Image: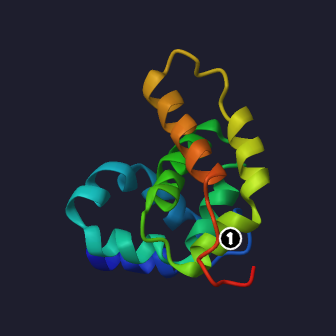
Amino acid sequence: MKHWLRLCFTLKSSSTSSATWKCPRSILPLMPSPHLRHNFTVMTRYISNPYNLKLMMNMLKEKSRNIQFEAFHVFKVFVANPNKPKPILDILLRNQDLLVEFLTRFHTDRSEDEQFNDEKAYLIKQIKELKPIAGDNQ
């Protein structure tokens, strides 16, 4: 499974309709639970790659609400990572205001889903509090 995940994570796609999209989209349900528990090394490598963050940010805007929701669970790992690599932090900082605005409006109909709303509030708070690395000329 580790090799399959590595292959999926390295596929690059400029369009969600391309053939290579099927692999990353098909692994979304795997990532929040088994992936985080059993394959920390692969997960760490995945969340250190700026391409993967951009992919998840785009997937948050997909037409399918199920894909959006699954992408949210992967995106939150990028944001919650206390050791964000500089390229990941730079992307989040560059999009800070847009992400806060987007997440504020994201799946507002899930008002009964307490865990989702807690996680969303946490992400918004974390994104608002992001600061450039000391000495970095942003």
Residue beneath the point at 56% across and 37% down: 120
Residue 111 drawn at (x, y percent): 58, 18
Give left or right: position of 78 versus 60: left
Q: Residue furthest top?
A: 112
The residue to which callout 1 is attached is 91
Crowd tier of the residue under label 1, counting other residues whose Cα lies within 10 Å: few below 14, some 14–19, many 20 or above: few
Q: Nearer the viewer, residue 54 or 117?
A: 117
Q: Which of the 4 image quadrants contains residue 64?
A: top right
Q: Quadrant where the C terminus lies?
A: bottom right
Q: In which quadrant of the rendered view does residue 2 lie?
A: bottom left
Determine whether the residue tagged by mark 1 lies in a helix, strand or loop.
helix
Work out which quarter of the rendered image holds the N terminus and state it.
bottom left
> Could you tell me residue 32's position as x and y percent?
37, 50
- The amino acid pointed to by label 1 is Ile
Residue located at (66% from left, 64% from top): 92
For image coordinates 48% across by 31% down, the residue present is 118
Residue 70 on image: x %, y %:
51, 45
Q: Nearer the viewer, residue 59 or 123?
A: 123
- The location of residue 40, given as percent across then percent down, is 27, 68
Q: Residue at x 26, y 54 (%)?
A: 34
| Residue 1 in sight from this viewpoint | no
The reply, left or right, for residue 83 in relation to residue 95 is: left
> As displayed, is residue 10 above or below residue 123?
below
